[in-house]
Image (spheres, grey):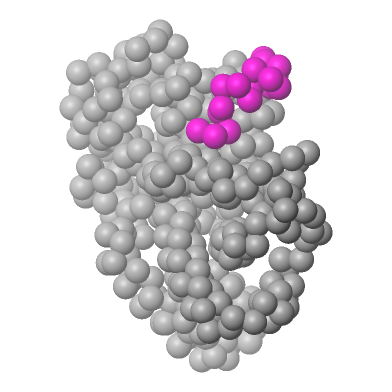
Amino acid sequence: ASHLGLRNACTYAGLRSWCQDQETRLYAARLQAWIKRHHDNAAEEEWWKTIGIDYPRTEDQGATVLVVPFKQALRLVGQRCVVVRGGYALVPFDQIPALAVERFSNVLGQSLQSKLIIRLLAKERADTGQREADTCFSPLNELVDAVGSLVRRMTGTDDDETGAASSSEEVSLRNLDLLAPRHFPLCARVTFKKLRQQHRLKYEARMQLVLFLKGVGLPVDEVLQLWRSEFRRVMTPDEYHKKKYEYSIRHLYGLEGKRKDYSPYSCQQIIQKGPPRNSDHDYGCPWAHGTREMLESLLESFPMPTTMMPEEEDTTLSAGAMDSSDKAISNCQMHLSRFAHQKKDTWIKRNRNSQYAPHMWLQDSLRIRE
């Protein structure tokens, strides 16, 4: 019950990663404790089989090893704990616990991508006229809310400030091109459009776009698929792998190197990096770094409503290379208000511009237009 409550409370990218890490550590500790209590090799082998660790065996340098598909032992391969031959990792018996932990982490990570189980079930019952759903599921929903609040206090995050899209419209590679013109902020729209047009991005643009996609909840596998489909149009597979683009993406998702879980750039971080060093302006903040002509051209690509909110009729949206970060962020938020034909104070809860980020713009856009 505690595991289910935690999983349902961690429904966006930042907390999903935290939940996966904590549950994996707990599983590893329990597994080691179980191994210490059971010194019977036969019992251990039976246990490995029950959790799917049942691979062919072979002899390597006088020792028996498991022959495991390369992709199912990526952590061991990355840590150079195993020998790789012909697409298979030769896993010694003393590394089987690490293999089991990696398998658990991967399965948990995939399952955490699913929607909120309890609330979806409650909504489905309510939609079919079964009003007793409120009575049945209310205690569970309260538990999920309480656990979510506790986790956010422990991790120093805020669901309203760092969460992935809470809209019923899932962000996936399949609908990314539909969401981009309707729900992406200008900065992400420019970078994503450049990727689609030129089929490659320079380093800063890659970092900014990958972390944005991570923030809106796009799984790492789909980001990798996007990169392959675009970059391989302008380079050979050998060139693509030599550049280590996929390693960089997995690193940003906390799956390589020090396994640090990188957060999406905030608006202030993007602005403080300064204007793009190239003439393409394929990254950065258009509101802070772009020229007025560039901004006007970008805004024309958005189908702005013909009627503005009365309170904002006299407000001029502006941009310039020396605009303050607060002004640039406020203008960007006001643009969403006008674009969605909503008063700003009816949807925005983030008064602290320092914590606003491009992926939050998309979340707000999805939410206020539902």
Residue at the (39%, 10%) spot, across then down: 278
- The percent coordinates of residue 226 (x first, y second) are 63, 33
Q: Is residue 286 magenta?
A: no
Residue at the (52%, 45%) spot, across then down: 79
- The percent coordinates of residue 344 (x first, y second) are 30, 47
- The percent coordinates of residue 171 (x first, y second) are 57, 48
- The percent coordinates of residue 104 (x first, y second) are 60, 65
- In this rendered view, identify the residue nearer to me: 306 or 93: 93
Q: Viewed as shown, does residue 197 lie left or right of 255?
A: right
Is residue 297 in sight in this rendering? Answer: yes
Residue at the (68%, 81%) spot, across then down: 43
Residue at the (58%, 73%) spot, across then down: 117
- In this rendered view, identify the residue nearer to me: 23 or 207: 23
Q: Viewed as shown, does residue 14 lie left or right of 239?
A: left
Query: Please, is residue 64 above or below residue 303 in the view?
Result: below
Q: Viewed as shown, does residue 277 lie left or right of 178?
A: left
* Residue positioned most to the top: 279
Residue stretch rendered in magenta on the structure: 232-248
What number of labels is visible? 0
Is residue 7 in sight in this rendering? Answer: no
Query: Please, is residue 285 above or below residue 278 in the view?
Result: below
Quadrant of the image occupied by residue 361: top left
